[in-house]
Image (cartoon, coloured by chain):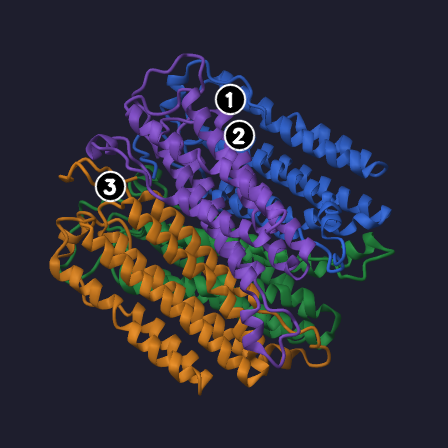
Chain colours: A orange, B green, C blue, D purple
Amino acid sequence: MASPDQGEASPRRVSLPTGRLEAFSDGVFAIAITLLVLEIGVRPDWQGNPLGAVVDLWPEYLAYVVSFATIGAIWLGHSAVTHYLEYTDPYLTRLNLLLLLAVSFLPFPTSLLGEFLSSESGERVATTVLGLNLFLANVLLGVFWRSARGRGLVHPDADDEELTLVTRRLTPGLAGYVLFIGVGLFKPFVAVVGYFLLALALTVPRRRPRRARDARRFARNA
Amino acid sequence: MASPDQGEASPRRVSLPTGRLEAFSDGVFAIAITLLVLEIGVRPDWQGNPLGAVVDLWPEYLAYVVSFATIGAIWLGHSAVTHYLEYTDPYLTRLNLLLLLAVSFLPFPTSLLGEFLSSESGERVATTVLGLNLFLANVLLGVFWRSARGRGLVHPDADDEELTLVTRRLTPGLAGYVLFIGVGLFKPFVAVVGYFLLALALTVPRRRPRRARDARRFARNA
Amino acid sequence: MASPDQGEASPRRVSLPTGRLEAFSDGVFAIAITLLVLEIGVRPDWQGNPLGAVVDLWPEYLAYVVSFATIGAIWLGHSAVTHYLEYTDPYLTRLNLLLLLAVSFLPFPTSLLGEFLSSESGERVATTVLGLNLFLANVLLGVFWRSARGRGLVHPDADDEELTLVTRRLTPGLAGYVLFIGVGLFKPFVAVVGYFLLALALTVPRRRPRRARDARRFARNA
Amino acid sequence: MASPDQGEASPRRVSLPTGRLEAFSDGVFAIAITLLVLEIGVRPDWQGNPLGAVVDLWPEYLAYVVSFATIGAIWLGHSAVTHYLEYTDPYLTRLNLLLLLAVSFLPFPTSLLGEFLSSESGERVATTVLGLNLFLANVLLGVFWRSARGRGLVHPDADDEELTLVTRRLTPGLAGYVLFIGVGLFKPFVAVVGYFLLALALTVPRRRPRRARDARRFARNA
């Protein structure tokens, strides 16, 4: 996929193309985001009031949209990271697996939110589990990016300013998740809305490469 | 994937290759279309009459075929759009996520149609929810295409006539969906058949590029 | 993906690269084959005899292996076809969707076989439904290949002898399926074993290109 | 995908590019690893103690992590093998399907482990089934690699030392699985932890190519 014929690597470092890491990750992201809908289903006792049964599922729709937006946002962040990756190495590939573990776990707390809605303490538990999972996924995405930079795997021609923008873009959510996990212990609904806003904030495009043509030279994804 | 070495972009615009957007979208389309079958299952009380239990599932088969045809049609439309895309940009990438949200939600109303068939008001609710979802997915596909054109992301060599054909192909369904959503409030079954015909209509190939060889120069998908 | 810069197409024919058709098809095949396992599960009344509960599932394991082998075999056949495809066209792309419809429906009769095993008439129904589905998928694969040849979409350099071998390889199963669907009305178990053998037969590699190097010139898949 | 224009094949051997084998395999690995989460769900009787219900699922979390780590490890091993593959052939393609059969079956014993936890004999059965499945998948991965080497399908420029490292990396787990399957008959929990450690051991990167630049010449994956 990549044609790694340039670049002066140290003889030590094992550097591998990113093609299959991206293909596998895209698969996991796409499946996790599409499986979310399986958690939505009307209760068996809908008889007599089908419209009510569909409307009553609103917490499940909300959980669906929040998790969809978060997986979408992390996919965008992941794409931004691999966009600047020249190579991967064994360490980063394993770190990527850990990130995918956190992402592919998300359908569970999403289903929990719908399941537990009828009980107040249940809501609090479900919201906290969801928040911790979202937090973990975002932390791992940040670690993924910092490791890539720290290990010298980003493209040497990448503009420093652009890289700083990516770093900034992947950072601010973390404090927000900590805040809303705390809020969720008292006001679960507010926390879920907060998670949604954090996912949206992560997808807001930052002002990026001023010189688009340079950026394209090694561009492979969005 | 793409080798974006030509094209004179304005220094402002962030233009990104379409490779990973297509890979992720293909994944979501493929999963959503394949998950539909999981919603089909015989009732636990089939004992004594297994053949009847299988035959009685015909509304679920119908819902399956309608949703399969629609996701297939939207995938074809999506392929036609990205066929003419030279680049994507952050806005279009996010719009694509919104389109995928609508597509990957379809297994839910599909299961609803099978679930609610035993009640007349249930049928009406399920048909309306399915129709709204199909309508939304088609609207977003149209917006996706118009945004791509409006933002100057289609290939500059693309024939104007071809582009107009794509626009025409992605348009007519919308009025049909509005019509059948209305019909569905009185005659749910007619509406479902209507949705099926609309999906088929969307897959009917329009007369397209007269100069196939030109078209191929930037062809990447079907 | 493909670089379609040679080939003298008639000015009428719309010929499109096969990249996205293959990616989408691979996705559907991979998902359908992996979803099969979700249909396997111990009965809720396993308490007291867990080993027995696992052993008693043998019809579900058998159904799993038969469907896995068949989807695998059809994927191999599909790969062989697209291996020789130079381009696709709108008709073939839609025919491919129909083939994928048949393939992605297979998890349903697979689950039926496990579900209906406790009743003799149930076994007969499940076996027949499975047989019809397998038959249909194989018919569509044959039609897919014949259409590709008939519409002049196979690579012009492809060896006639090789193409005949592909045709022969995709043919013989059909009579077998008709036979075993009939047998299944009396001896369901024999029919299921027959389906399995037919899938294996379809995967047996035929003697193929004598001049491997020629074949490779346009080789893209296995 | 691959451009197989060099390499002196014997006129007999049918050698095919590895592109579609990798795409299909990546799909199956990605789906199997993401489906695992569907097996986790709180018992219907969680009312009154939602936090307890979530905590009580720890054996399901453990099973999830063990299976995730193992599928991840086998994917890494599979990537290492195809990294050195120059071509595939019909035999290896079918062997790959068999490996995928073992991998995509893993969600079943994973769900079994969660299901059977309440009974001591159940735990033993579930642990043994999981161990046998993990063992089989690892055996097939080893056979896959040895067949690729034995059939002359690895890249001729590949360093012998590197190839030996891959062989060594794919070997040691087997004895471990046999050991822990035995242990599991007495101490199921110890066996599950053992399976987890074996998966981790398989993911530990071995010291690899000293001359990274050479390795890259035919590098396609990680």
Alpha-carbon span between mark 3 and mark 1: 41 Å
Q: Which residue is mark 1?
A: C163
For the C terminus of chain B, the image quarter is: top left
**Number of numbered tags placed on the structure image:** 3
Instruction: Respond whether the residues carrying marks 1 and 2 are from the same subunit.
Output: no
Amino acid type assigned to the residue bearing label 2 in the image: Arg
Alpha-carbon span between mark 3 and mark 2: 30 Å
Q: Chain of mark 3?
A: A
Estimate the x, y position of residue A131 in percent, counting from the top left: 41, 73
Mark whose residue sits in front, 3 or 2: 3
Foreground pick, A170 / B118: A170
Q: Indicate which disc residue D158 carries.
A: none
Amino acid type assigned to the residue bearing label 3 in the image: Ser
Q: Which residue is mark 3?
A: A15
Q: Is residue B70 above or below residue A49?
A: above
Instruction: Respond whether the residues carrying marks 3 and 2 are from the same subunit.
Output: no
Amino acid type assigned to the residue bearing label 1 in the image: Leu
Foreground pick, A42 / A166: A166
Q: Chain of mark 1?
A: C
